[in-house]
Image: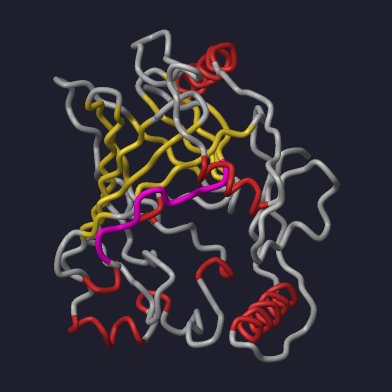
Amino acid sequence: MSARTFAVVALLAVAASAALAQVTPITPPAPVKGDDQTGAFLPAGVESADQATERVRSHKPDPGKSPVPRTPWDGKPDFSGVYWPTVAVTPARVPLESLYRPDVREYREGGGAARGLIDWRGIDSPAYHCWPPSPANGSTALTFQLVSAPGFLLMLNEGGGTFRIIPIVGENERPQDQSRTPSFMGSSVGHWEGDTLVVEVTNFNGKPWLGGGRPPQTSSEALRVVERWSRPDGQTLEYQAVVEDPQMLTAPWTGPVQRRGMLAYDSIQEALCVPDPELYARHREYAASAAGRRSGGPGPGRGGRGARGGGR
């Protein structure tokens, strides 16, 4: 399929999905306690991050009340929509850190592929250098949009402005060509198992960090991720990944089942990641302040990044 043909198909799919999508208005629940960076400046009636998280966590999927939308071309679940926030509804069986091979400790201590770039012993992270999010989390961060199209699933990631194009092959079709240049987000190919979309991701460049543990939870070019995407009802999306990397891990790691709520938006917003020394310094100051508060020590006043809520 040519790029032009795919673009036309994707636009038609967006139009069809908009007509089929079942989105209900969000009524913010009562405020909840927690270290919420958004509650101090959001207007009344707009969900804070804590409120949205609690709403998604307490949601009981009910496909009878909110049916799963389906595509007109194959009758499979339509993933089209904007999703935020993420809640782990089933924890991982074991911590990712427990599976790292002892002989890669020195490589990890050096920052892996980020040696000389990221000072992980402070509060630095790949995100401050505009690296894409972890493949163990679907390469998603904050808010993202999915678009179902015939033979494809398109992911648009507001956090960092990245995207994924996931081809979906049928039972008797040939796998997609995986000979492209290795990348942060790898090469994806999906297939249906009932109403669950199973996506195999390979061809990584060995640079991504898989989690936020210390020392860095690095990966190698042998990384392979198998994702399972499903829709319990018309208001939610669930995701789980199995991560394999024989050069780093002693066994495959099965991640948590993550649930995302659907937002009543028709598209994500523009978001750019631009390395900025001044902004980076403020990130470091905020992180040091947060660490001080957690340890009971002194720290400057509250601050932080905004989050998506129930209006804009």
**Quadrant containing the C terminus in the rendered view:** top right
Question: How many marks are shown on the rendered structure?
Answer: 0
Say how the picture is coloured.
secondary structure
Residue visible at 63% across and 23% down in the picture = 24
State the residue in front, 14 or 196. 196
The image shows residue 2 at horizontal and vertical percentages of: 41, 23
- Figure check: 277 above or below 32: below
Where 67 falls versus 270 (above or below)?
above
Measuring from the top left, give residue 92's x and y in whole percent: 30, 58
**Where does the magenta region start and end?**
84-94
Q: Is residue 86 magenta?
A: yes
Residue at the image point whose x is 35% and y is 86% from the top? 109
Q: Where residue 283 sits in the image (x, y, percent)?
A: 67, 75
Quadrant that contains the N terminus: top left
**Depth order, front residue of 163/52:** 52
Compared to 99, does 221 lie above or below? Answer: above
Residue lying at the far bottom of the rendered structure = 297
Q: Quadrant of residue 237?
A: top left
Give whichever of 142, 108 is nearer the camera: 142
| Magenta stretch: dominant secondary structure | strand
The image quarter in which residue 41 lies: bottom right
Residue 189: image quadrant is top left
The spot of residue 100 in percent (x, y) is 23, 74
Please state if 34 lies on the left or on the right of 151 as rendered: right
Q: Residue at the location (56% across, 19% down)?
A: 22
Please, which residue is most extreme toward the top here?
72
Side of 79 where 195 appears, left or right: left
Residue at position x 65%, y 49% in the image: 51
Magenta stretch encompasses residue 199: no
Q: Is residue 116 left or right of residue 200?
A: right
